[in-house]
Image (cartoon, rainbow, N blue to C red):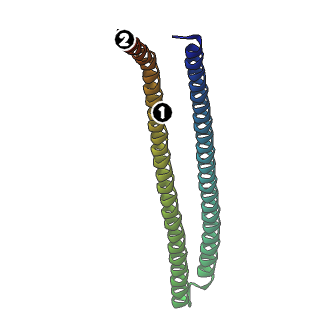
Amino acid sequence: MTKDDRQFITGLFQALNQKIDGVESSLNQKIEGFESSVNQKIEGFESSVSQKIEGFESSVSQKIEGFESSVSQKIDGVESSLNQKIDGVESSVSQKIDGVESSLNQKIDGVEGKLMTEVRRNGVLIEQNTASIEWLVESNQTMNDRLTRVEDKVDRIEENTTVLPAIRMTLKNHGKRLTALEAA
């Protein structure tokens, strides 16, 4: 093997190593960027869901406290009115109690409806979050598969470059034999 052949092969190896380093660096940057982006999205989503749940809990607590206060005030008013008018207003008191009861039932039904709506909405958010996580896991697996394929190609290139010097040597020996045969 001549000096030029060695330099040529060395140059090929250097170029190959540079390309491999470039591919590896590029893949590492892409993977790190992807992981960072995914982590930021997950953290943002978790924060958003947590804030919505906290806001919902606070809103429900305030509504329940207001409702309890309102009910308490109405009951106190009804009791006072009953104490003053018990003698001749039995039917009137009965009608007022029915009205209060109906109003309370409507308000309770309204609060229950709102609670169920929020529970359903939160269930949808959880399903969306689960779907996003599954997509991220699949994307990560795809990236890992691609990286494995690149590593396999690099291994094959390295195997091929070790076979070239042996082929050259065989060709030179064959050429020398042909020259010797032609001379004879």
In the image, 166 versus 67, the foreground residue is 166
- At x 50%, y 71%, the residue is 113
| Residue shown at 43% from the left, 23% from the top | 160
User: Quick check: marks 2 and 1 in contact, CB under 8 Å?
Assistant: no
Q: Which mark is residue 96?
A: none
Image quadrant of residue 19?
top right
Percent across and percent down for residue 82 are 58, 80
The quadrant the C terminus occupies is top left
Estimate the spatial distance between the alpha carbons at disc 2 and disc 1, rounded to whole Å: 41 Å
Q: Nearer the viewer, residue 153 or 177?
A: 177
Nearest the eye: 10 or 141: 10
- Does 178 sit left or right of 134 as displayed? left
Residue 66, image x, y percentages:
65, 66
Q: In this image, 178 relative to 80: left or right?
A: left
Q: Is residue 2 above or below residue 91?
A: above
- Image vertical order of residue 64 relative to residue 106, above or below: above
Query: In the rendered structure, which disc, 2 or 1, sits on the residue that comes first in sequence?
Result: 1
Give the numbered dot on residue 177: 2
Up the image or down, 73 lies above or below 88; here it is: above
Mark whose residue sits in front, 2 or 1: 2
- Give amino acid for label 2: Arg
Residue 78 lies, with reference to residue 30, above or below; the image says below
Nearest to the observer: residue 46 or residue 16: 16
At numbered mark 2, what does the secondary structure look like: helix, strand or loop?
helix
Quadrant assignment, res 4: top right
Give, as a three-letter code, the residue at label 1: Val
Find residue 25 and report its horizontal and vertical position in percent: 61, 31
Residue located at (52% from left, 57% from top): 125
Residue to which mark 1 is pinned: 150
